[in-house]
């Protein structure tokens, strides 16, 4: 149905389609920090009511618990099986694909590309059980590694830790991968989006432009901990929004660079669909996303790796990532001539 050139969704759609939209809307608002704002607002508001003691108690708890995102987090297993995640998965849909078995007696860094606009596949694959991670990789314990800022807000920090997420810091990854205290069991997985916020500015539909050449911190951590390095590629992640290409040297690019440098966030200019229309809005398009987990690269533990050793493993990782992309693109992409562009 079109009104003034705007195409609206039919009034009568199956309930499950409506629930899928609501599930993804929840995550979009979460990603856009709506719940951070609510969390801070409630904390401050309650201070001026007779329930001020709730904010004071939480402040004490926050202080005591501040380092938890850097020391294994606080996963609550039942939160990973909520029905909302299955509706989220089916909206696109998102599928997790295993290529080889992974030994639960090893620890792993899942090096994931591309970042995309809002990391939809990373969230659903590695912070929930909706795509059957426990059945595909029995004995492995995934931790989605996300921005430190996600753990500052009263509501956001608790939500992300419930899902097993941890902060993106060297000490956080090493805590997990050296099997300290809360992560004593082998089979720990750090699911890390290598390109980070900067790569979200390169998330143009039909392209795979990766910020990787200077990203070597995860390589060094793999060597220092002996964690196996696993290339992971998500086909379709960049296709869920239309992204405006920004010219080099433009004012918009200057703003994006400022946001990345000082706020550690990407500011891509995007257009999606709406909740009730198909022409514009903040909702992603219903595009299939297929996440392929590749073969692990064996890593020998080196306490103090040299730059040469880091560079050698980095080149090997890039080679395996390109190989994984080339072997699977004919299955999951319409454009069989697509190439990985690595910067």
Image (cartoon, helix red, strand yellow):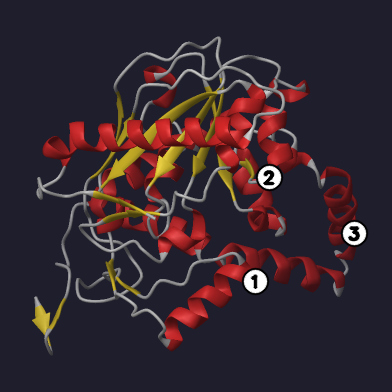
Mark 3 vs mark 1: in front:
1
In this image, 301 relative to 122: left or right?
right
Which residue bears the numbered disc 2? 169
Residue that badge 3 annotates: 56
Left or right: 195, with 164 as reference point: left
Residue contact between numbered discs 2 and 3, judged by CB atoms under 8 Å? no
Q: How crowded is mark 3: few (under 14 residues within 10 Å), some or many (20 or more)?
A: some
Where does the image place residue 58, in percent across and percent down from the top left? 84, 54
- Tag 3 secondary structure: helix
The quadrant of the picture occupied by the N terminus is: bottom left
Quadrant into which the C terminus falls: bottom left
- Seen in the picture, residue 332 relative to 37 is either above or below; the reply is above
Q: Which residue in the protein does label 1 denote?
A: 262
Reading the chain from its start, which is encountered first: label 2 or label 3?
3
Q: Earlier in the sequence, mark 3 or mark 1?
A: 3
CA gap between label 2 and label 3 equals: 28 Å
Q: Nearer the viewer, residue 286 or 3?
A: 286
Residue 282 higher or lower than 183, as above or below: below
* Secondary structure of the residue carrying numbered label 2: loop
Quick check: can you spot residue 76? Answer: no
Q: In the depicted view, which residue is nearer to us: 154 or 235? A: 235
Q: What element carries label 1?
A: helix
Mark 2 or mark 1, earlier in chain: 2
- Marks 2 and 1: CB-CB under 8 Å? no
Distance from Cα at disc 2 to Cα at disc 1: 17 Å
Q: Which residue: 41% across, 30% down?
A: 316
| Image vertical order of residue 79 relative to residue 276, above or below | above
Instruction: Give the Cα distance between marks 3 and 1.
Output: 30 Å
The residue carrying pointer 2 sits among few (fewer than 14), some (14 to 19) or many (20 or more) residues within 10 Å by Cα, namely some
x and y, in percent, of residue 150 in the image: 63, 55
Place of residue 40 in the rendered image (x, y in percent of width and height, measured from the top left): 72, 67
Q: Residue at x 85, y 57 (%)?
A: 54
């Amino acid at each position: 149905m079109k009104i003034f050139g705007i195409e609206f969704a039919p009034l009568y759609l199956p309930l499950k389609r409506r629930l899928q939209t609501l599930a993804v809307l929840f995550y979009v608002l979460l990603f856009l920090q709506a719940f951070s704002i609510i969390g801070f607002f409630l904390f401050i508001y309650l201070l001026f009511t007779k329930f001020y003691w709730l904010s004071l108690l939480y402040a004490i708890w926050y202080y005591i618990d501040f380092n938890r995102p850097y020391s294994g987090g606080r996963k609550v297993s039942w939160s990973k099986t909520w029905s909302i995640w299955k509706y989220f998965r089916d909206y696109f849909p998102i599928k997790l694909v295993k290529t080889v078995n992974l030994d639960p007696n090893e620890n792993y860094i899942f090096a994931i590309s591309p970042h995309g606009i809002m990391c939809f596949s990373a969230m659903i694959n590695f912070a929930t059980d909706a795509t059957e991670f426990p059945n595909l990789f029995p004995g492995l314990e995934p931790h989605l590694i996300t921005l430190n800022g996600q753990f500052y807000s009263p509501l956001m920090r608790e939500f992300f830790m419930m899902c097993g997420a941890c902060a993106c810091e060297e000490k956080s990854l090493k805590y997990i991968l050296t099997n300290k205290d809360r992560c004593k069991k082998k089979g720990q997985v750090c699911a890390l989006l290598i390109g980070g916020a900067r790569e979200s500015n390169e998330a143009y539909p039909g392209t795979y432009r990766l910020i990787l050449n200077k990203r070597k911190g995860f390589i060094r951590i793999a060597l220092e901990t002996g964690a196996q390095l696993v290339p992971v590629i998500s086909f379709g992640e960049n296709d869920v929004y239309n992204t405006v290409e920004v010219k080099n040297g433009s004012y918009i690019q200057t703003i994006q660079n400022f946001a990345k440098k000082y706020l550690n966030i990407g500011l891509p200019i995007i257009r999606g669909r709406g909740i009730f229309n198909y022409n514009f809005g903040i909702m992603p398009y219903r595009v299939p996303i297929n996440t392929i987990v590749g073969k692990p690269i064996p890593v020998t533990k080196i306490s103090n790796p040299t730059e040469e050793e880091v560079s050698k493993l980095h080149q090997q990782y890039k080679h395996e990532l390109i190989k994984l992309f080339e072997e699977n693109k004919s299955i999951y992409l319409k454009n069989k001539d697509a190439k990985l562009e690595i910067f």
